[in-house]
Image (cartoon, helix red, strand yellow):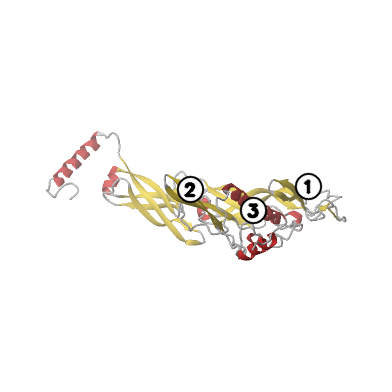
Amino acid sequence: TSLSDSQTHSLSLSLSPPLRPQPRQPLLQRQHRRGGRERRACLVLRLRGRAGRGARPGNAQLGPHAVDLVHQPRCRVAAAPCGARPRARVRHRRHVLQRHRSRDRRRRERERGRGGGGGGGGGRQRRKQGPQQGDDLRVDVEIDFMQAIFGGDEKVKISHLETCTTCTGDGMKPGTRPRTCGTCSGSGVVTQVARTPLGMLQQQSACPQCQGSGQIVDEVCGGCTGRGRLQKSKQLMINVPAGVDSGSRLRIRKEGDAGPKGGPPGDLYVFLTVRPHKEFKRDGSDIYSSVKVSYVDAILGCEVEVNTVDGPVNLKVPTGTQPETVMRLEGKGVPKIGAKDQRGTHFVTVKVNIPTSVSGDDKEMLEKLRKGASVSAAGAGKGFFSR
């Protein structure tokens, strides 16, 4: 029996399997044949970050997270299931991924320009208009060697900014009030929007009309010409503690520059440099010096006068002292800072003075010393030094 065309079409629809939407596969593979060997290459779409459930490159659930396109030439996977597009165009996929990255990057830049989009920026930032802390100052002072050891007072001349006494630091004429800047509406900052290839870029800078203060003064103070501070010079008397050394730093509070808008002044830091001494050398809390004795005094022993930071003292040189012998004077060094009772040591190096020429009598005496020394060295035990 012959069927009509309409009946044939309805029969073919009833016999064909129902169409089901195929899930999008994360792996797209293509086959290559080279040299009789089959090799598969796959493209892997890898999501980084916390993507939503069912997220894929074209889905809005990705948000700012990136999508990587990784090419693995020897990735062995199963055959492409029904619904997967074989021989996908790699360039098209890469272009799609780059477009998603650019869109997310532009959105993040727009949110950053608006102050974080409600996360933590809060829009335009208002500059400080009240009193501010002044800057710290530094001055270098050179002191004497003895003053560094025992301390004392030192005069220091400085130049710093002081608050104007007429306007008390606000820069306005007494009896007047400032007005709000019309350019920035009192915020002190202006926002500039520039169009870039990455999107709209917002940039904030200080208002050129009010210089970031948010207010405009029509009548300025005549004493400071509207600056609120004046440059003045003064002389200070500082107390140098005992035991300081080169590089020590002293802090004098509230002697720096005065702050803007009548703010508190900063601090003054005094850096010390100790002038070298012609006789003494210092290493921490110890002092080093030298004393010269004759060769006869070094052999027979003597008592010499040695200069210290406390004055001259007598030093006993024992018999048979060798050249470059170092002797100690306890408690004659530099006192420790904050503990004047604890002092270092004074080290004295003995320098033996040997003459370049001797007289006839001295030469005869030295010959006797030589004979006695040779006999003692030979083992007789009764030389000149054994008497």
Q: Secondary structure at mark 2?
A: strand
Q: Residue furthest right?
A: 175
The residue carrying pointer 3 sits among few (fewer than 14), some (14 to 19) or many (20 or more) residues within 10 Å by Cα, namely: many
Q: Which residue is mark 1?
A: 208
Up-down relation of residue 294 to residue 108 (above or below): above
Answer yes or no: is residue 136 visible.
no
Alpha-carbon span between mark 1 and mark 2: 66 Å
Residue 154 place in picture, x, y as percent? 60, 51
Quarter of the view holding residue 58: bottom right
Q: Which mark is residue 32?
A: 2
Q: Which residue is mark 3?
A: 100
Q: Are marks 1 and 3 in contact (CB under 8 Å)?
A: no
Quarter of the image for the N terminus: give it.
bottom right
Q: Secondary structure at mark 3?
A: helix
Q: Nearer the viewer, residue 358 or 18?
A: 18
Give the amino acid at mark 2. His
Give the amino acid at mark 3. His
Q: Residue at x 47, y 52 (%)?
A: 40
Alpha-carbon span between mark 1 and mark 3: 39 Å
Residue 153 place in picture, x, y as percent? 59, 53
Alpha-carbon span between mark 2 and mark 3: 30 Å
The residue carrying pointer 1 sits among few (fewer than 14), some (14 to 19) or many (20 or more) residues within 10 Å by Cα, namely: few
Residue 252 place in picture, x, y as percent? 63, 56
| Left or right relative to 270: residue 117 | right
